[in-house]
Amino acid sequence: MSTLNLIVAADSDGTIGVQTEEKGWTLPWRCPKDLAHFQQKTLGHTVIMGRKTWDSLPHKPLPGRQNIVLTRQAAIKHDDVEFVQSIEGALMHANHTQIWFIGGGQIYTQILPFVDNIWFTKIRGATTTPEQRTVKFHTFEYFLSTNWRVERAQSLGFTATSLNSQHHLAVVYQLVKVKVKTL
């Protein structure tokens, strides 16, 4: 049986992505230590993502992982990547017992009721301006308060750099939430 994991980082406003002229959709901060954490967790496993997350990747596919992309666009093709049109289809193609949902917001919203674990990195402060086009993930807070318990939380001693202002933001914690199982 597979374990379904969701991995996400968000700022204090719930922002998980921003659209820029140079890069298109991207993370609104730079935090190499959190990216290393992401790689350590997902390496050797299946990663499932939406098409906008796929488009935002600087290197495609993510190496050392089975990459599955959810999209409504049937014409997209890429070597070593499976493109599917439903979460059910993605799960049928997954070859590993650890499956990681890595974004974006629409995918998180759809899969959140079904995942077993959430790995959440909180960036303290807002990383975008009101004029910027962003992706927010507010549904997350609801589920954290109702169906989940904290297994462990770790305060982190490193910072992220905002793409907007180059000021440093504290990476407050990485949190593991485990679904409360009901009989």
Image: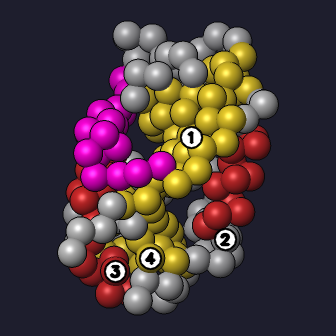
- Label 4, label 2: how far apart the Cα atoms are: 15 Å
The answer to whether marks 1 and 2 mark residues whose Cβ atoms lie closer than 8 Å is: no
Q: Mark 4 or 3 closer to N-term?
A: 4
Marks 1, 2: nearer the viewer: 1
Task: Answer yes or no: is residue 55 visible.
Answer: no
Q: Which mark is residue 91?
A: 3
Residue span colored magenta? 133-150
Task: Answer yes or no: is residue 5 visible.
Answer: yes
**Residue that badge 1 annotates:** 121
Q: Amino acid at mark 3?
A: Leu
**Residue that badge 2 annotates:** 43
Query: Could you tell me which residue is drawn at 78 percent across and 31 percent down?
Result: 157
Q: Amino acid at mark 4?
A: Thr
Q: Mark 1 or 2 closer to N-term?
A: 2
Q: Mark 3 or 1 closer to N-term?
A: 3
Q: Amino acid at mark 1?
A: Thr
